[in-house]
Image (tube, helix red, strand yellow):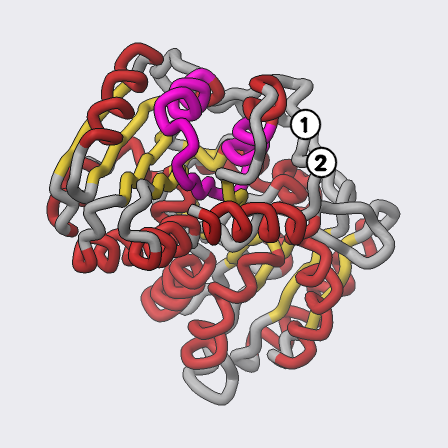
Amino acid sequence: MKAQEFVDTLEGILEIEFYAGVPDSLLSPLTGEIMNRYGISEKHIVAANEGNAAGLAAGYHLATGKIPCVYMQNSGEGNMLNPYASLLAPEVYKIPCVFVIGWRGEPGTKDEPQHVFQGEITQTLMELLTIQTVVITEDMKAEDLQESCQVFKRLLSEGKCVAFLVEKGALTSDVKVKYANSYTMKREDALREIVKGTGEDILVSTTGKASRELFEIREQNGQSHQYDFLTVGSMGHSSSIALSIALAKKEQKVWCIDGDGAMLMHMGAMAVIGANAPRNFVHILINNESHETVGGMPTVAGSIDFAKVAEGCGYQRILKASTPEEVARVVEEAKGADELTFIEIKAALGARSDLGRPTTTAEENKKSFMQYVKEM
């Protein structure tokens, strides 16, 4: 089904006029269509996380009486669960909302390890939340979607939430939205300098292409992967993982490679890091102002001064870089510093078309990393 037809149906039958969410690669045709129509505006907000999107949806309904639409990957259901159960649900405020959810890890399909269990429980979770769900498939006909929307319209009028669960490849689009920023350094080039400068220090990297690139850099260098914990899922939590490691291994330097989308998703972690202020911790933000791993939609990172945020949270040394030479310099400075350090690296969008994925399993990565940390 064309994303244009899907959006036309939502807007025609359910009278949707507001969208908020966190992008997903399976939903790229949908978010591309929304971006093509509304860009980033009062009609379309790219949220920090899925709970934030649910809150935005609630506020929109309270102000207008109209039905909001929230889009997300199914991994975001956890972030959405609390505001749904304690705010939107019929047993609480009866705030109607249409959820459009990308079904990563759908049973019977091949996907990344962090999506498999989530995919298995997705429908069960929606049933537990009493959210009536319709699966959008590749062969779904327009009249079937229209019929489902008519059913949903009645449920929404009763203050209930509903959901479309979108299978891989179910939505397509001819709309091509090009995302870019003004920076020139590739993230992979920044990572190469980080790998050089950190040596055999402990390194925790965020989910997405950063971890994939880090894995390949180690392979190309003939290095062990034991130094690195690759946070393949749990977006936004790599810095919390790294903080606990730093507090437990005070004599070892611990580095965290974060992304702007991940940092925004759970920015409260920075306040906790600053309050604990481990002297052996370096928090690196590679900021390309986008959700690049899932299509490149912009985050709000372009309008945030992360250096001031870090300073306000209690980070003691603040460094910045936007070229490989600057990255090498600030990494060297951070390595020699004996205080909580924050580094913001500005990077361009884009990755190699032949970028692979880790060839070790998540459990193998964990065991190798834990053994290395234990022996330090």
In contact (CB < 8 Å): disc 1 and disc 2: yes
Mark 2 Cα shell of 10 Å, populated few (<14), some (14-19), many (≥20): few
Toward the viewer: 9 or 114?
114
Residue 355 in the image, given as x and y percentages of width and height: 64, 23
Res. 213 image quadrant: top right
Judged left or right of residue 190, residue 229 is right
Residue 14 in the image, given as x and y percentages of width and height: 59, 61
Residue 320 in the image, given as x and y percentages of width and height: 22, 25
What are the residue bounds of the magenta stretch?
189-215
Judged left or right of residue 267, residue 97 is right
The reply to whether residue 318 is visible in this rendering is: yes
The reply to whether residue 266 is visible in this rendering is: no
Queried whether the magenta region covers residue 47, the answer comes back as no
Q: Nearer the viewer, mark 1 or mark 2?
A: 2
Task: Give the residue type that dot 1 points to.
Answer: Gly
Judged left or right of residue 271, residue 252 is right
Toward the viewer: 311 or 214?
214
Most frequent secondary structure within the magenta stretch: helix
Task: Give the residue type that dot 2 points to.
Answer: Thr
Residue at position x 60%, y 21% in the image: 222
Q: Is residue 69 above or below residue 30?
A: below
Q: Is residue 13 above or below residue 281?
A: below
Q: Is residue 179 above or below residue 150?
A: above
Which disc is residue 356 wearing? Answer: 1
Residue at position x 83%, y 49% in the image: 109
Residue at position x 69%, y 78% in the image: 127
Judged left or right of residue 153, residue 198 is left
The residue to which callout 2 is attached is: 359
Which quadrant is the N terminus positioned in? top right
**SS at badge 1:** loop
Mark 1 Cα shell of 10 Å, populated few (<14), some (14-19), many (≥20): few
